[in-house]
Amino acid sequence: MDTYKLRPGDMHRALGDIRLTHEGPALPTEAFDLAVRRQIRTSLSALADPVTTSQVWDDLIVSDEQREIIEEILVHARYRTHVFEQWGFARKLGTKGRGLSCLFSGPPGTGKTMTAALIAKELGLDLYQVDLSRIVDKYVGETEKNLGRLFDEASRVPVVLLFDEADSLFASRTKVESSNDRYANLEVNFLLQRMETYDGISILTTNLGTGIDQAFKRRLRFRLHFDLPTPEEREVLWRSMLPEGVKVSEDVSWSKLAKRWEMSGAIIRNAVLRAAFLSAASEGVMTQALLERAARAELMELGRLGS
C-alpha cells in the first residue's frame, strides 16, 4: 500500500465500499486494493477513459528489436524502486529523469495502442487513454491546470497514462512568431516536465515517423517506432485473426493475401471481420474471394485504392 497516495476521504470511502460486500473484522487486501482503485477511477474519468484488452502478447506481431525495447520498458517499471531507492540513483538524478516516459511512433494501426494496453496488463495496472481535446484549452494557463489535475490524480495510485495521437504536440518547432506559438511551447514543456517526474508510466503515441522535435525526444526515456508489417508479418497477422470456429476454404492463400495487400494489423483485422460477415451471409465458409473482396473494400474506404 506504500505506492498509494490517499487522502483521508479516499480511505473512508474505500472502507465503506468494502463493508457493503465483506463481513467480519478481516478485510481482504485484494478487496481494499480494488476499492481504492475505484475511487481513483472516478476522479480520473473526467479527463481520461479506462482501456482494457483481452489480447495477449502472442497477438502482437513485432520485430525482435521492438520486443527487446518493450521488455526493457517492463524491466524498468518492475525495478525502478530497487534501482532508484535501494541503489541510490535517486540521490544522483533527483526527481528529473525518474519518470518512465515513452514515445510510440508509426503509422495508424501498427500496434501502438495495443502495446500500451499489453504493458499495463502485464504490470497489473489500469490504463487510461487521455483525450487531449478535453485537456487542451484555448485560454492561457488552463491547459497546464488540466494537465496538473490529471497527473495529480494519476499519482495517487500507479496507472499507465496513454496520450494517444499526440501529433499536434510533437510537430517540429520553428521560430516563435506569435504569442500563441509561445504558449503552445510552454504547454508541451509543462507536459514533458510532469512526465519526467511522474511515478507511473506515461506513453505518447504519434503517427509522425519523422519531423519530431529532437529536444522532445531526448526528454523521453524510451522511443519505439512501429513500421508497417512486412509480407511475412502480414501473413502471420492474417492467420492469427481467425478464431478456431471459422470454416476456411482450401483455396485460401494467406501468403497471396499478405503479398498483394500492404496493410497494417488494424486494417487486416477489419478485413477479416468484414469477410466473416460476408461468409456468414453466404455458405458459412471463409473463401479467398471473400477475403480479397473485404481487403479491397477496406482500402477503398481509406482512399488507398481506386474504384
Image (tube, grey):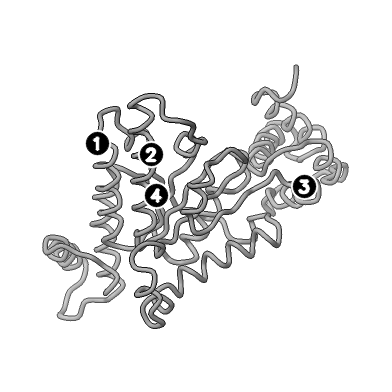
Left of 301 or right of it: where is 293? right
Badge 1 vs badge 2, beta-carbon distance below 8 Å: no
Q: Quadrant of the N terminus?
A: bottom left
Residue under label 2, please give it: 131
Q: Quadrant of the C terminus?
A: top right
Residue 186 at x, y percent in the picture: 34, 39
Please, what secondary structure does the residue beneath circle 3 have?
loop
Residue under label 3, please give it: 230
Which sits earlier in the primary sequence, circle 2 or circle 3? 2
| Amino acid, disc 2 | Asp
Residue under label 1, please give it: 141
Residue under label 4, please give it: 192
From the viewer's perspective, is the residue at label 1 or at label 2 nearer?
1
Which sits earlier in the primary sequence, circle 3 or circle 1? 1
In percent of the image, x 16 and y 67: which residue is there?
15
From the viewer's perspective, is the residue at label 2 or at label 4 nearer?
4
